[in-house]
DNA sequence: CTGCTCACTTAGGAGAAGATTT
DNA sequence: AAATCTTCTCCTAAGTGAGCAG
């Protein structure tokens, strides 16, 4: 077709694989409209695969990754369709690691953890009333809500702009040539802090506080928030300024301990924030302890024979042993892990030696013949001993540890004491790459001072390296925030020692991140309008970009940089989606099924704009096939460059922050309408968490559901069922007292719940009987102990028998009940009223348990923490907490409160702060 | 551009610490 | 007091994106 004709001029984003033509002719476009082609092989319908891909082996090592090369894009022309993946549907969060697992059902548990399997009839069937929750197409469901939210966003954007124009004539030019670094800075201008830039000195006054409130000019350097609210009234300050000032003053000199000191968010912004510090002092890093060889008699056995490993090899063996002993041992079953480990282990043995009992060199040829159990026992015994230490010993150990790390805990950053994050050098171990990482299981070697670069103030004392060693380098880069750095041996990735999350620098950049996201509010409508238009562009690159933006915006996908497929797990983000990752179901549904960051599976079906649907079809047009890039003329830097033209500093990732925070903000607003928002603290917390959960789902933050989950649910379900049984019995007792109640209340009231069938009841009764029996027996024994302790004569067995009589009675009672279908009133002075209140109590308990169960199940594979920590503007939470009168501790743990100190302080009392 | 280096944020799981139940 | 479950902290892998040289 005509199309191919011009494949030229446009620069290609993707060097390999089958490409789309660079232009889309009108005719083609129209054709696409009508045709309902079923192009390429199995495109429609079900999502393809779940499985494997993976092509030959991946050996070949070569450096790569974080530090190293990224590239990739080799089109795998391998049509590896089959994989009888029945896949789908399952909640499965991650792809099982290898083909083998695929058939999962059988029982290869270790690797995949139970979760993958089909669940046994869950507690739901047995107990819970079933909460609306789970209909599948979550994406579909969320879509509508999102649409509303977006509409709102658009309106708001207009309002913001309107205000702004009024306030200041020439508002920011949207584009501007963007002189290299300029862009980035510029944006900050409204950031209080530090806003960057040099340039901006010019008068164009850049103020404009974010949420458009009336601004008093002073703003430009206004720090933040505080002012924003309190609008007119200077009232704001609660503990007000004076207090602050003193505090600040104090902090100046007493920089020592007042960690709470400096409130940078109230300080004037700095002009150049590329310089991160003027002076920086710290004590370097804490190295992992030396390896201590095992006692001579603890050995590995090979093929039944004891082996004396050289210390170097032995250390590597202990890495393995440590993992055998650990709680989760699944890595050890992973063939890639095993193979990589063994390759490295063999190398160590070759290099450093291993001898048999007679001192002869011995060849270790197979991991299967290596028997580490003796070492494992030793290790376990040691752990046990540690656990059994006395209180004093434990305290002493802790004191020693504390003393050891004390020097590294804090650094001094421009005179202020700041917490350091990871001052400990990563100890040697086996590399635990996630997903199908080709290098997982390799030995991550010990880091020597010679590999470490120190970054420190010029005038500061350089930490002394361990005796006999020296640092790789010492530098004084004021534009870097790290204190020490090295490269790891597996991938050449850079590792940095940086400040902790509670530090000022990290707080500042967190703050900036959210302000940037808020700034996007002002542009979002235009951006959306533009990409909607570009969905029809005849320039393929533009159309792809628009389509990608659509996905990033609506589905919160990550940008999707290229990766080095040889040396890293095969995962994708938006721009790196491949042909096989989406399937289209006319008229407008798209199913995504791919592994994202950390090999977490993204498997959602969404309704999309018809034009998007059409485009995706176009991007999958033959001859494209499995392994080819969906967006072959787009990459993240092009995308980001485009975004940057709307707003300095705008990148794909900002959308995730924006959408998460904005969504949270809208959801929380809606809560005001829920009556429960006036309920108990627990209820309010639950409501908040429900919102949080929606955001987490949007971002696809998952976690592995623990092995015990199903069981726990079962247990909870049983408890609930038991309560309902008790409730029914109580009702029956009412009848026992006043048969006339049957008419009054209606027969239905006294019906037994259907699921409480005879069989279950018998079982449950048996359980209750057992329970009582053990209770009584225990009590008896305990009483006897007591007597003995008091030197009194213990009660005879007979006493126990007598006491157990109650159990017999219970049994008899149940029997009778089962036979007659009646229940005798229990308790002293039973009255109908008493029973009624008892029933209410039971109902309450049931309700509590039910929400608990619901909650737990809803949470089973969703991780709330990631969004809370990284995506939801903490000020939203603070405001919510104030407005609804829930202590902030309910939402933020101690460390989170430290991390978000800036947020807590800057909007306190600001119930009207808005994202 | 491309390819590479480097810095910094985001992410889930392991393990420790607490809380609750037995 | 031990066992078990929950929550929090630590750990470090895996992303994003800037900037530079060719």
Image (cartoon, coloured by chain):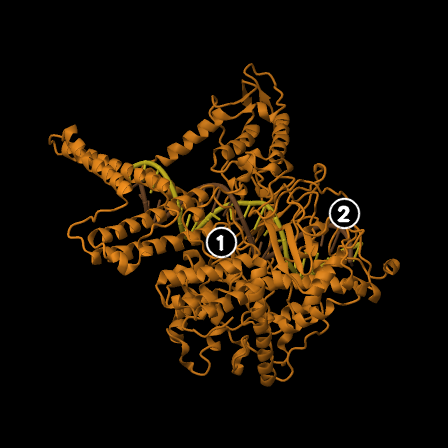
Chain colours: A orange, B brown, C yellow
Residues marked 2 and 1, same chain: yes
- Look at mark 1 in the image and give the residue it sits on: A420
Q: CA distance from mark 2 to mark 1?
A: 44 Å
* Residue shown at the point (43%, 82%) measured from the top left: A233
| Percent of width and height locating residue A197 | 62, 71
Placement of A692 over or under A57, stated as above or below: below
Residue A744, compared with residue A911, is above or below; it is above
* Mark 1 Cα shell of 10 Å, populated few (<14), some (14-19), many (≥20): many
x then y, percent, for residue A706: 47, 44
In percent of width and height, residue A239 lies at 37, 73
Q: How many marks?
A: 2
Which sits earlier in the primary sequence, circle 2 or circle 1?
2
**Visible residue check, residue A459:** no
Q: Position of residue A589 (x, y in %)?
A: 66, 58
Task: Say above or below: A553 vs A475.
Answer: below
| Residue bearing mark 2 | A75
């Amino acid at each position: 077709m005509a199309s191919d004709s011009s494949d030229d001029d446009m620069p290609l984003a993707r060097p390999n694989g089958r490409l789309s033509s660079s232009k889309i002719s009108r005719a083609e476009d129209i054709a696409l409209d009508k045709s309902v082609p079923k192009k390429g092989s199995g495109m429609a319908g079900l999502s393809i695969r779940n499985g494997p891909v993976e092509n030959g082996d991946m050996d070949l090592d070569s450096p790569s990754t974080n530090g190293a090369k990224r590239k990739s894009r080799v089109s795998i022309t391998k049509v590896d369709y089959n994989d009888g993946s029945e896949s789908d549907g399952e909640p499965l969060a991650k792809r099982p690691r290898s083909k083998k697992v695929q058939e999962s059902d059988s029982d290869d548990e270790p690797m995949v953890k139970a979760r993958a399997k089909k669940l046994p009839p869950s507690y739901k069937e047995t107990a819970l009333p079933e909460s609306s929750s789970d209909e599948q197409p979550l994406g579909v469901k969320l879509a509508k809500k999102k649409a509303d939210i977006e509409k709102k966003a658009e309106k708001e954007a207009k309002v913001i702009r309107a205000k702004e124009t009024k306030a200041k004539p020439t508002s920011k030019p949207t584009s501007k040539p963007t002189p290299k670094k300029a862009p980035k800075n510029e944006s900050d201008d409204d950031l209080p802090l530090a806003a960057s830039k040099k340039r901006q000195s010019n008068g164009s006054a850049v103020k404009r506080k974010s949420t458009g409130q009336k601004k008093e000019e002073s703003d430009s350097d206004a720090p933040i928030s505080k002012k924003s609210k309190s609008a007119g009234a200077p009232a704001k300050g609660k503990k007000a300024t004076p207090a602050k000032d003193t505090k600040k003053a104090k902090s100046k000199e007493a920089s020592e301990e007042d960690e709470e000191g400096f409130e940078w968010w109230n300080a004037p912004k700095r002009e150049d924030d590329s310089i991160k510090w003027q002076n920086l002092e710290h004590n370097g890093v804490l190295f992992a302890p030396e390896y201590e060889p095992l006692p001579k008699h603890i050995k590995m056995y090979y093929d039944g024979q004891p082996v004396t490993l050289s210390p170097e090899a032995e250390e590597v063996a202990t890495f393995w042993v440590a993992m055998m002993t650990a709680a989760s041992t699944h890595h050890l079953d992973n063939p890639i892990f095993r193979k990589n480990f063994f390759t490295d282990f063999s190398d160590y043995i070759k290099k450093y030696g291993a001898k048999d009992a007679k001192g002869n060199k011995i060849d270790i040829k197979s991991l299967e013949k290596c028997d580490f159990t003796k070492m494992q026992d030793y290790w376990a015994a040691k752990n046990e001993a540690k656990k059994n230490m006395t209180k004093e010993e434990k305290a002493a150990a802790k004191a020693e540890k504390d003393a050891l790390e004390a020097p590294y805990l804090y650094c001094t950053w421009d005179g202020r004491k700041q917490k350091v994050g990871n001052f400990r050098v990563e100890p040697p171990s086996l590399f635990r790459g996630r997903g199908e990482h080709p290098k997982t299981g390799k030995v991550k070697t010990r880091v020597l001072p010679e590999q470490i670069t120190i970054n420190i103030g010029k005038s500061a004392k350089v930490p002394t390296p361990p005796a006999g060693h020296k640092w790789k380098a010492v530098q004084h880069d004021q534009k870097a925030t790290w204190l020490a750095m090295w490269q790891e041996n597996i991938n050449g990735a850079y590792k940095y020692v940086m400040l902790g999350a509670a530090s000022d620098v990290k707080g500042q950049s967190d703050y900036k991140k959210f302000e940037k996201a808020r700034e996007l509010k002002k542009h979002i409508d235009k951006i959306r309008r533009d990409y909607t238009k570009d969905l029809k562009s005849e320039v393929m690159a533009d159309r792809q970009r628009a389509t990608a933006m659509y996905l990033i915006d609506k589905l919160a996908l990550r940008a999707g940089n290229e990766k080095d497929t040889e040396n890293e797990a095969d995962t994708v983000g938006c721009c790196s989606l491949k042909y096989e990752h989406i399937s289209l179901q006319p008229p407008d549904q798209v199913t995504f099924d791919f592994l994202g960051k950390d090999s977490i599976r993204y498997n959602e079906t969404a309704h999309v704009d018809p034009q998007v649907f059409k485009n995706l079809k176009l991007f999958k047009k033959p001859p494209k096939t499995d392994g080819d890039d969906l967006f072959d003329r787009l990459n993240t830097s092009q995308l980001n460059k485009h975004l940057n033209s709307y707003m300095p500093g705008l990148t794909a990732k900002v959308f995730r922050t924006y959408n998460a925070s904005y969504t949270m903000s809208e959801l929380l607003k809606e809560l005001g309408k829920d009556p429960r928002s006036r309920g108990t603290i627990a209820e309010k917390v639950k409501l908040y968490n429900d919102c949080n959960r929606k955001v987490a789902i949007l971002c696809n933050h998952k976690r592995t559901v623990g092995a015990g989950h199903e069981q726990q649910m079962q247990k909870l379900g049983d408890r609930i069922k038991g309560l309902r049984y008790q409730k029914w019995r109580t009702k029956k007792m009412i009848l026992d007292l006043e048969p006339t109640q049957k008419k009054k209340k209606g027969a239905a009231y006294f019906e037994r719940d259907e699921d409480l069938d005879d069989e279950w009841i018998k079982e449950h009764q048996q359980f209750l009987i057992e329970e009582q029996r053990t209770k009584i027996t225990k009590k008896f024994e305990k009483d006897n102990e007591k007597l003995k302790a008091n030197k009194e004569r213990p009660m005879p067995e007979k006493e126990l028998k007598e006491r157990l009589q109650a159990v017999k009675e219970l049994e008899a009672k149940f029997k009778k009940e089962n036979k007659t279908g009646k229940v005798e009133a229990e308790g002293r002075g039973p009255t109908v009223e008493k029973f009624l209140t008892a029933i209410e109590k039971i109902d309450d308990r049931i309700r509590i348990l039910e929400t608990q169960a619901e909650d737990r199940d809803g949470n089973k594979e969703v991780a709330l923490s990631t969004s809370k920590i990284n995506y939801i503007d903490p000020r939203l939470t603070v405001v919510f907490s104030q407005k609804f009168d829930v202590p902030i501790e309910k939402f933020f743990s101690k460390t989170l409160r430290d991390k978000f100190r800036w947020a807590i302080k800057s909007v306190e009392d600001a119930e009207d702060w808005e994202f």
